[in-house]
């Protein structure tokens, strides 16, 4: 069993991505088009069967509210049960800081350190990517989900 493994979960939209990191380097990844509520338990059971996990990292938003809730509750439960530290960061770090789909023509944008919604009629989004190196300095122990959406007008 490989020891001192960190896991990064990006589950804000389809596909779900899980990166497995050893010494901050991506050594394996899992990608699934299934709903996080249907597949996370299976993915993490397989991971815990193969690896000794020391840290859990995830994107806590913005994105699909349901996906954020499922990921947060799932990882927070694992963190408590297995006594593994949980860390979070916003999703913009994994899509080159491009707009993230909110609802309709609204997209989440990050300007400086503030996340807002903006309306775009025609925009090309950038898919999330697992980084080759896990930069732990970009994460925080403040793991509360980022439910950021302005008034829909």
Image (spheres, rainbow, N blue to C red):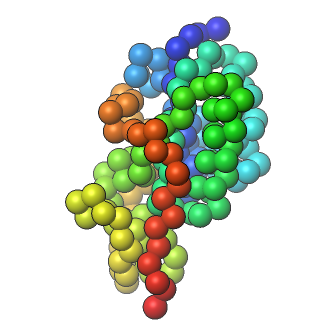
Question: Which sits in the foreground, 67 or 128?
Answer: 67
Instruction: Confirm whether residue 124 shows in the render.
Output: no
Question: Which sits in the foreground, 124 or 140?
Answer: 140
Which residue shows up at 63% across the image and 16% down it?
Answer: 51
Which residue shows up at 41% across the image and 40% down it?
Answer: 140
Question: Which sits in the foreground, 125 or 84?
Answer: 84
Question: Which sits in the foreground, 146 or 52?
Answer: 146
77 vs 126: above or below:
above
Which residue shows up at 40% across the image and 22% down it?
Answer: 24
The location of residue 20, given as percent across then percent down, is 53, 26
The location of residue 149, given as percent across then percent down, is 47, 73
The location of residue 77, given as percent across then percent down, is 69, 38
Judge left or right: residue 139 versus residue 56: left
Count of labels in the image: 0
Judge left or right: residue 51 versus residue 85: right
Which residue shows up at 46% across the image and 84% down it?
Answer: 151
Judge left or right: residue 148 versus residue 17: left
């Amino acid at each position: 069993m490989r020891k001192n493994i960190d896991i990064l979960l990006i589950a804000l939209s389809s596909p779900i991505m899980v990166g497995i990191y050893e010494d901050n380097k991506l050594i394996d990844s899992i990608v699934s088009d299934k709903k996080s509520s249907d597949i996370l338990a299976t993915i993490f059971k397989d991971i815990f069967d193969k690896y000794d996990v020391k840290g859990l990292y995830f994107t806590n938003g913005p994105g699909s509210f349901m996906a954020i809730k499922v990921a947060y509750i799932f990882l927070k439960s694992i963190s408590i049960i297995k006594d593994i530290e949980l860390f979070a960061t916003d999703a913009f770090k994994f899509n080159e800081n491009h707009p993230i789909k909110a609802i309709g023509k609204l997209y989440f944008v990050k300007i400086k350190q503030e996340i807002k919604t903006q309306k775009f009629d025609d925009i090309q989004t950038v898919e999330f990517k697992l980084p080759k190196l896990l930069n732990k300095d970009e994460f925080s122990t403040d793991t509360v989900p980022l439910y950021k959406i302005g008034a829909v007008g």
